[in-house]
Image (tube, helix red, strand yellow):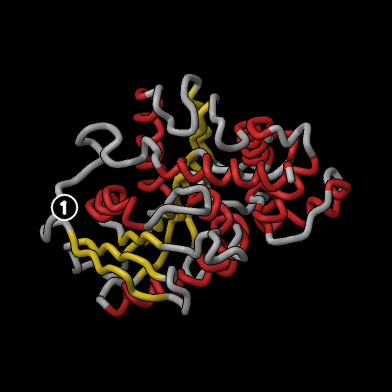
Amino acid sequence: MWGLIYVGAFLVSFAASAVLKMTWPPLGDKYSVRWDDSVGTVYTDPSYGEGDANKFDLYLPADSTKGTYDLVVYLHAGGFTSGDKSDDAGMLQWLCSKGYVAAGINYTLFSEEHPDANVYTQSVEIRDSIPYVLAEAEKRGYAIDRMAASGGSAGHTLAMLYAYRDAAASPVPVKLVFGAVDPSCFYPEDWTCFGFDRNPEAAAVMFSVMSGNSITPEMIGTPDYDEAVKDISALAWIDGNSVPSVCAYGAYDKLQAFPASKRLAAALKEYGVPHEYILFPHSGHGLQNDNKLYAQYMDKVVEYLDKYMEE
């Protein structure tokens, strides 16, 4: 019973993460654009699968004269239970204004209607969507030769899973990943915000729902547990071949496991992965109280895009 209560509380509160400071524009006009035909064109709702949510929006820059283009995928927030690609229209428009083909991709959300949806099935949908995104762009005259994955909160988790776990199977090279405030791994001792460090029963129920695997309290802390959550833990897939990464976290985040971000930063450092880990010391999940650091985060995103999408 307590486990189910924790699951419900987590999903309701974490869904609120859709309301991030990343709602555009975050810093006035610097990272926004007045969208019209001179900037680009958006094609809404091409399908990539049979599910109702298996749709994406494709933003194509007005300049159609280049031989090849870079793709930036941005995945929406919402605690794996809510949100929509349209929430990130401002971000996608801004990326398109910089000359990138940009795509926002929906995925099947965990709900009463879809109780079997979980972080793993959502990550598989994102993986399977990419060939369709590339084909749609090429059909419209925009051949893609490389890409970046990105997102906010839950979307950042899915972006990192694609960039770290699935990059080797990507139809085009993945050059970097960026985003903020995601859960990158599922060690219960990190999840003090929901008391999972003190309640293994609740942790087992919660992470069973998120992984789609049956986890018992007795498994926690064992290799069997690590294997059960591996496919949803971006941290588990980092190695010396991982792509450059830019990430940001709020020290007072109460909606996901902030201590997990320190594990992420340590792994990126250990394996020599070029990265920027930006800590917002006065902010929570919304990164709301550190405007100068938010500017630094966005500046680093631009720097990494300019550098690694050109290699």
Residue shown at the point (52%, 72%) measured from the top left: 128
Q: Give whichever of 10, 48 is nearer the camera.
A: 10
Q: Position of residue 252 (x, y in %)?
A: 54, 25
Taking 218 as reference, is 179 left or right?
Answer: left
Q: How many marks?
A: 1
Q: Position of residue 120 (x, y in %)?
A: 62, 61
Q: Is residue 128 above or below residue 279?
A: below
Residue shown at the point (66%, 41%) measured from the top left: 6
Identity of the residue furthest to the front in this view: 1
Q: Position of residue 15 (x, y in %)?
A: 49, 45
Residue shown at the point (22%, 52%) measured from the top left: 97
Q: Quadrant of residue 309?
A: bottom left
- Circle 1 residues within 10 Å: few <14, some 14–19, many ≥20: some
Question: What amino acid is found at the position of numbered circle 1 in the picture?
Answer: Trp
Q: Position of residue 121 (x, y in %)?
A: 59, 65
Residue shown at the point (36%, 39%) measured from the top left: 22
Quadrant, the C terminus: bottom left
Q: Give whichever of 60, 243 is nearer the camera.
A: 60
Q: Is residue 171 above or below residue 163?
A: below
- Residue that label 1 marks: 35
Identity of the residue furthest to the top in this view: 282
Q: Is residue 272 above or below residue 292?
A: below
Secondary structure beneath label 1: loop
